[in-house]
Image: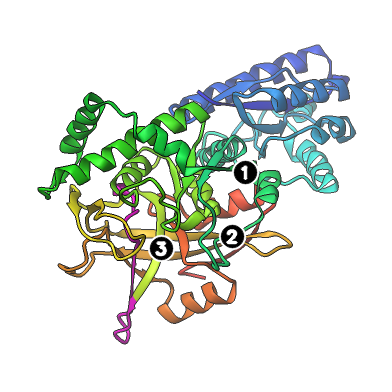
């Protein structure tokens, strides 16, 4: 289980009795938050920080701890903030400044100067906040009594975003083939994304995967076919085509494990050695949390993986989608999102069907794919573009609706309303350079994306339904 370190500040001016109480209170809050965030993250208290050396030791230790995804800081008493500078300059994890107290209410009848000196976050946190601003450190601030549900919910959101940032820093993406020829928006500076987000994106020859595919034992294929029968309806007599995708699925699992890969791209322009464009195989992988981007779109592959990590403890679906076409009925405009094959079955309203149909692109055999209608519900659409000078996240709210009947369209289908209106949403998306590949999520909100953008120093432009 990943952890967050609660770092509490004080000073020696008030004596050992106060420091003992500060330490006990820090442990109380850490235990409470750990219980509330159980299943997401553990909260561990650090030693109490009373000097520059303490701050440096604690924060440097947290920054080097692979299990620690973030730190929470709180000044129980007044904590002169110059002593935090060296430590904060070493920080490489997301930071939350918790502005709270161990006491919910003031004990009006008994309050004295000893109580005031012990419980002065209103004083100490302002001193600390100034240094955070002076150092220009991105951070989140949560204000209120630590036991209140609103405060717990904000800390949980910070924890989930921090887990996603931790996953981002460790992400490895494999591109089979390169970016689709002549396409601009799916391309980008892979080195800069490595520096900015931590994404290690490297090219792998498709032949490396083909070698694995050609060695898949027949018994392994039978096991995978049994898995498909359990998870999906098989609505085709072309079992060989489905078995071909099963081989791709097994080989990709093996490749990902051997190379510690979390996300992949492919392109229909580079299928040498394959009989089909990977469809069912990729869809099944996406349902297990693997990031994917078609036509070499590594940015969306990585973004989908990171956002899936952010949403993994929430209800709802998160995954890659492509904008395809519109229903422009006046006042009832809808968008149809799909792809040639690769839409994750996490969006399926009902049990998906495996079907085999010709594909008029790629020049290969008819591929097996999952066909289904998507779920309903409010959600967001998010994309990432490279503007040369910087990366930009673009996000807007949507409402997924039941797809219309499309009996001659044998692909996975999502339909949504663009909010607050079709015209306003699309003007916003186009004016800001939004691409045709994106991530749809019914689990995340624009506030989640905003926090991710803040903590990673990434530009965000967003459009909410209710401004």
User: Where does label 2 land, which residue?
Assistant: 187
User: In the shown orientation, is residue 275 left or right of residue 423?
Assistant: left
User: In the shown orientation, is residue 174 left or right of residue 47?
Assistant: left
Mark nearest the camera among 3 and 1 is: 3
- Above or below residue 54? Residue 285 is below
Quadrant of res 63 = top right
Cα separation, mark 3 vs mark 2, equals: 15 Å
Q: Earlier in the sequence, mark 3 or mark 1?
A: 1
**Among all residues in the image, which is located at the extreme front?**
273
Instruction: Please tell me which residue is depicted at 45% across the width and 53% down the height of the picture.
Output: 270
> How many marks do you count on the picture?
3
Q: Where is residue 142 shown, x and y percent of the image?
A: 62, 43
Mark nearest the camera among 1 and 2 is: 2
Instruction: Please tell me which residue is depicted at 20% across the width and 49% down the height of the picture.
Output: 352
Q: Where is residue 250 shown, x and y percent of the image?
A: 33, 33
Q: Earlier in the sequence, mark 3 or mark 2?
A: 2
- What is the span of residues highlighted in magenta in the rendered image? 326-346
**Cβ–Cβ under 8 Å for marks 3 and 1:** no
Colour convention: rainbow
Cα separation, mark 1 vs mark 2, equals: 37 Å
Q: Where is residue 6 shown, x and y percent of the image?
A: 65, 27
- Mark 3 burial class by Cα count in 10 Å: few <14, some 14-19, many 20+: many
User: In the shown orientation, is residue 377 left or right of residue 238?
Assistant: right
User: Where does label 3 land, which residue?
Assistant: 322
Q: Secondary structure at mark 2?
A: loop
Q: Secondary structure at mark 1?
A: strand
Cα separation, mark 3 vs mark 1, equals: 36 Å
Q: Using the image, tell me which numbered label, if any, was put on residue 142.
A: 1
């Amino acid at each position: 289980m990943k952890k967050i370190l609660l770092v509490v500040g004080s000073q020696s001016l008030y004596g050992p009795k106060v420091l003992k109480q500060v330490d006990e209170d820090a442990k109380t809050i850490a235990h409470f938050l750990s219980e509330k965030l159980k299943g997401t993250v553990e909260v561990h208290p650090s030693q109490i920080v009373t000097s520059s050396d303490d701050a440096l030791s604690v924060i440097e230790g947290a920054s080097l701890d692979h299990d620690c995804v973030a730190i929470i800081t709180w000044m129980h008493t007044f904590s002169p903030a110059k002593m935090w500078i060296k430590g904060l300059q070493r920080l490489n994890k997301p930071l939350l400044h918790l502005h709270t107290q161990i006491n919910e209410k003031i004990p009006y009848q008994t309050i004295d100067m000893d109580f005031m000196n012990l419980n002065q976050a209103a004083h100490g946190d302002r001193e600390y906040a100034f240094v955070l601003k002076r150092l220009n450190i991105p951070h989140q601030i949560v204000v209120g009594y630590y036991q209140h549900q609103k405060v717990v919910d904000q800390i949980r959101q910070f924890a989930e975003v921090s887990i996603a940032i931790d996953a981002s820093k460790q992400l490895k993406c494999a591109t089979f083939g390169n970016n689709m020829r002549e396409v601009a928006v799916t391309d980008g500076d892979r080195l800069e994304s490595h520096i900015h987000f931590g994404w290690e994106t490297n090219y792998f020859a498709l032949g490396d995967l083909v070698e694995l595919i050609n060695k898949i034992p027949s018994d392994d294929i039978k096991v995978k076919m049994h898995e498909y029968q359990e998870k999906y309806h098989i609505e085709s007599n072309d079992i060989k085509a489905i078995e071909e995708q099963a081989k791709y699925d097994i080989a990709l699992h093996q490749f990902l494990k051997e190379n510690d890969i979390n996300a992949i791209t492919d392109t229909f322009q580079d299928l040498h050695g394959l009989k089909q464009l990977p469809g069912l195989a990729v869809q099944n992988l996406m349902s297990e949390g693997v990031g994917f981007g078609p036509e070499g779109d590594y940015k969306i592959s990585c973004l989908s993986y990171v956002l899936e990590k952010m949403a993994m403890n929430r209800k709802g679906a998160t995954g890659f989608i492509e904008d395809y076409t519109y229903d422009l009925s006046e006042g009832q405009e809808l968008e149809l999102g799909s792809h040639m094959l690769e839409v994750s079955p996490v969006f399926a309203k009902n049990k998906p069907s495996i079907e085999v149909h010709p594909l008029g692109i790629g020049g290969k055999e008819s591929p097996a794919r999952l066909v289904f209608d998507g779920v309903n519900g409010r959600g967001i659409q998010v994309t990432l573009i490279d503007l040369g000078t910087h990366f930009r996240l673009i996000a807007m709210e949507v409402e997924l609706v039941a797809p219309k009947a499309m009996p001659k369209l044998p692909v996975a289908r999502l339909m949504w309303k663009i909010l607050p209106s079709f015209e306003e949403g699309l003007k916003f998306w186009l004016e800001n350079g939004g691409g045709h590949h994106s991530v749809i999520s019914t689990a995340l909100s624009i506030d989640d994306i905003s926090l991710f953008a803040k903590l990673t120093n990434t530009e965000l432009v967003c459009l909410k339904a209710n401004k």
